[in-house]
Amino acid sequence: MQILDCGDFIVHRKYGIGQYIGVNTIKADGIIKDYIKIKYKGDDILYIPTDSLDNIRKYIGAEGKEPKINGLTSKDWEKTKAKVKSNLRQVAEELIRLYATRQKTTGFAFSKDTPWQQEFENQFPFVETDDQLRCIKEVKKDMEKTKPMDRLLCGDVGYGKTEVAIRAAFKACMDQKQVAYLAPTTILSQQQYESFLDRMKEYPIKIEVLNRFRTAKEQKEILKKLELGEIDILIGTHRLLSKDVLFKNLGLLIIDEEHRFGVKAKEKIKEYKTNVDVLTMTATPIPRTLHMSIVGMRDMSVIYEPPQDRKPVQTYVLEYDDEVIKEAITKELERDGQVFYLFNQVENIESKANYLKKLIPEIKVDFAHGKMTGSALENIMEMFVNKEINVLVCTTILESGIDIPNANTIIVENADRLGLAQLYQIRGRVGRSNKQAYAYITYRRNKALSDEADKRLKAIKEFTEFGSGFKIAMRDLEIRGARELNGRNATWAYGTSRL
C-alpha cells in the first residue's frame, strides 16, 4: 500500500473510486480498531479495517484531472470495469494467442556453454556487477530450454544490458544459429555493430549491419549472404523487418527498446516471436510490457546495480541563459571533455552551431541530425569519437545508444517540448565513465510552461539517483495518464489500479 495523504483518491476492488479522508479509531463489539475512512459520492462513507488494506490501491491517473467518484450503491463502477474489459479483450486475445502458440511450440534448446564461451566472457574488459552476472545466467538458462525464450531485460542506461545481449548472441552462434539485433535508430544500430565487432574480433563470427549507412548494392549483398547462412549476426533498424530479409537459421532475436517501434514493425516482431528465442531490452519499460512480465506472460531480469565507480548525473533545470551555457561548456572543455548540445530543430541547427561558435570561439563545434546522408552522419560521429569535435549540436538522434564516455556534459534546449522518458534517455548519454557528469535541462526564459511540462521538468530533476528508470516510467504514466495503455483509449481505473 502506498502512503496516503488526506484528499488522495483511492480505488476499492468492489466499490470503485473514492477519496481518503483519514483514519478513525472505532470501538465495535468491545474491540478497538483503526479504520481507513473513504468518502464516496454524496454522503456515502466506507470504513476499511487497517488489516484489510489488500482491497484498496492508491489512484494513479493523469494529474490535475480528478476522477469521477463512485457511489456505494451505484452501478457505475461495475459499468466502468465492464467497459475496460471490453476495450482490452481484443488486445488480450491477440496476446494470449501469441503466447499460447509459444507455450506449445518446441523451440531450439541451446547447448551448455562451450570453452570458447568462457574464454570470450573472460575477455570482457570490465568487472561485471552481480546483477549483470545474474541476468546473464537467467538468459542462458532460458536459451537452454526447449520452450522459446521471451525475456525482458530492464536496466538503467549504461548499466550493461548490451553485454548481456552480446553474450547471448555469442552463445547462439556457438550452435550455428543466426542472431538478429533490432535497434530503433540508425546511430544505435551502427554503434552496436561496432561494439559487437570489437568484442568478437578474435572469433570466426560474421557480423553485418543493415541500415541507411549501407548502399543499396551493399544491402543486396548482405541479404544474399544472410539467406545462405554466411552471416551469423545481423544488426539493424526496422529494415530487418522487411520482406526481403530472410534468415537461413534464425535462433535469437534481440530487441532494443521495443516500444520505440511502430505498429507495423511490432506486427512483424510478433511473427518472429512464435518460434525463436527473444530478448527485449529497455531502460524505461512501458506499463503493458512491465505488466506482462509481472503476471508471468514474459520473464523479466532486472539490473539494479550501477557499474563500478559510476556517479549520478548532476542535473540542473533552469531558464536558458547564455552565460550559464558558456560556463558549462568551458568547464567541460577545461577537463578535456566533450559536450552534447541537444537542439531539436533541423532547420535551425546549423545556425545554432554557428551561434555557439561565436559565443565560445575556442570550441570545435559541428552538428548532426537524422536527415543528413548516411555518410555525412557517420563522418560527423567518427570525428566526435576521435575528439576532432568537442561540442556536438544534435537532435534527438542521440536519444538511444550514442556511447561516448568522454562526453560528460549535456545541454538540452527547449526541454519542455520533450517527453519525460525521452529526457531520461537523453540524460543517460552522459555519465558513462567514472567522471562526474552534468545535465543542463533548459527552457526559454519567461516562457509560461504547461502543467504537464512543469511536472516533467520537476520529475527529471527529482529522479537523479541510480535505478530511476522504473520511477520515471511510472511518473510518466501519472503525468500523461494511461490513455495509450494497450494501444487504445482505455479507461484508467481497471488497468492501473491493478485490480
Image: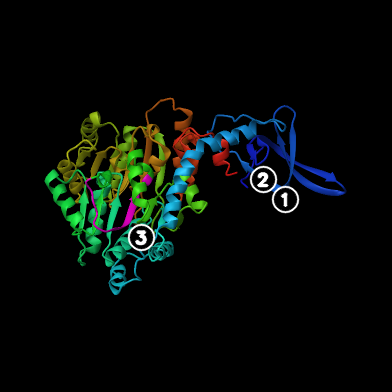
User: First in sequence: mark 3 or mark 2?
Assistant: 2
Dot 3: what SS?
A: helix
How far apart, in angstroms, are the residues tagged by discs 2 and 1? 10 Å
Q: Which mark is residue 13?
A: none
User: First in sequence: mark 3 or mark 1?
Assistant: 1
What stretch of residues is rendered in magenta?
Answer: 244-258
Mark 3 or mark 2, which is nearer to you?
2
Q: Which residue is mark 2?
A: 55
Q: Say which quadrant the C terminus sits in.
A: top right
How far apart, in angstroms, are the residues tagged by discs 3 and 1? 43 Å
* Amino acid found under the numbered disc labelled 3: Val
How far apart, in angstroms, are the residues tagged by discs 3 and 2? 39 Å
Asked if the stretch drawn in magenta spans residue 254, the answer is yes
Q: Which mark is residue 51?
A: 1
Q: Residue furthest bottom?
A: 115
Q: Residue furthest left?
A: 217
Q: State whether residue 428 appears in this view.
A: no
Camera-nearest residue between 348 and 100: 100
Camera-nearest residue between 336 and 249: 249
Q: CB atoms at circles 2 and 1 under 8 Å apart?
A: no
Q: State whether residue 98 appears in this view.
A: yes
- Residue 77, relative to residue 448: is it above or below? below
Asked if the stretch drawn in magenta spans residue 225, the answer is no
Would you call the spot at circle 1 few (<14 residues within 10 Å), some (14-19), or many (20 or more)? few
Side of 492 relative to 131 (left or right): right
Q: Which mark is residue 164?
A: 3
* Amino acid found under the numbered disc labelled 1: Asp
Q: Residue furthest right?
A: 30
Q: Percent x, y for residue 294? A: 51, 52
